Image (cartoon, rainbow, N blue to C red):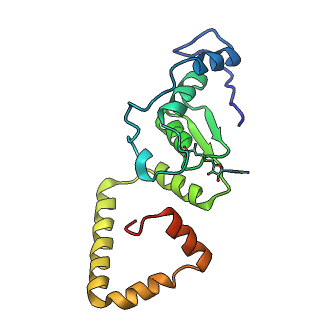
Amino acid sequence: MGIYQPISMKRIDIPDMGTKEKLAALLGQDLDFREQNSGYASHHFYSFPAKFPPQLPHKFIQALTLPGDVVLDPMMGSGTTVLEAFLTGRQGLGLDIDPLALMLTKTKVTPLKSNLVAQISMAVVQNAAYAVRKDKTSLEGSLQKRWDAKTRAFVDYWFARET
Ligand SMILES: C[S@@+](CC[C@H](N)C(=O)[O-])C[C@H]1O[C@@H](n2cnc3c(N)ncnc32)[C@H](O)[C@@H]1O
């Protein structure tokens, strides 16, 4: 993974150091975040395998970049780094070969109007409740036909049935 080296080297926490020294200093710090809350913003939207605690990219982004800088994660998974970049006023760029990772990250970093989301969610739940009451058997049948076998196996593996 490339490390974006900003033009200005002025940083708040460990000033007057080159990027290599900053990295060494950061790696020497306590990077155990198990006791901290990792569920803020949309970080807990989905528990992607081997997901970073958000405090980890946060620490590196704060120390190595400035607001407005570009932060690239070329294997972003569920986009923890991209979201942290966004939350700290950087421009987050992410890539991944997994379409689920792309969908998750896009969802996590898209700002939404909460009242509109509440309205739409209510309509979705009402429509779903109506469809279940009306004809549960044909609904289950159309859900089963929705994906090809490979996609269904993928979804069954990664998502709980309720999800
Ligand atoms: C362990 S996950 C990263 C998780 C991420 N740190 C997070 O917090 O969610 C590694 C990711 O690398 C992606 N990946 C593996 N090989 C890749 C490649 N050649 N190009 C792009 N992405 C790749 C995988 O699809 C996977 O999503």
Residue 31: x percent and y percent? 51, 25
- Against 12, is 147 above or below? below
- Against 83, is 147 above or below? below
Residue 127: x percent and y percent? 30, 78
Kindly identify the residue that appears in the image at 65 percent across and 11 percent down.
17
Please tell me which residue lies in front, 160 or 4: 160
- Against 140, is 121 above or below? above
- Against 128, is 105 above or below? above
Q: Quadrant location of the N terminus? A: top right
Kindly identify the residue that appears in the image at 52 percent across and 65 percent down.
157
Q: Quadrant location of the C terminus? A: bottom left
Please tell me which residue lies in front, 90 or 39: 39
Kindly identify the residue that appears in the image at 58 percent across and 55 percent down.
101
In the image: residue 130, left or right of residue 42: left
In the image: residue 124, left or right of residue 69: left
Residue 75: x percent and y percent? 65, 46
Quarter of the image for residue 40 reads: top left
Quarter of the image for residue 140 reads: bottom left
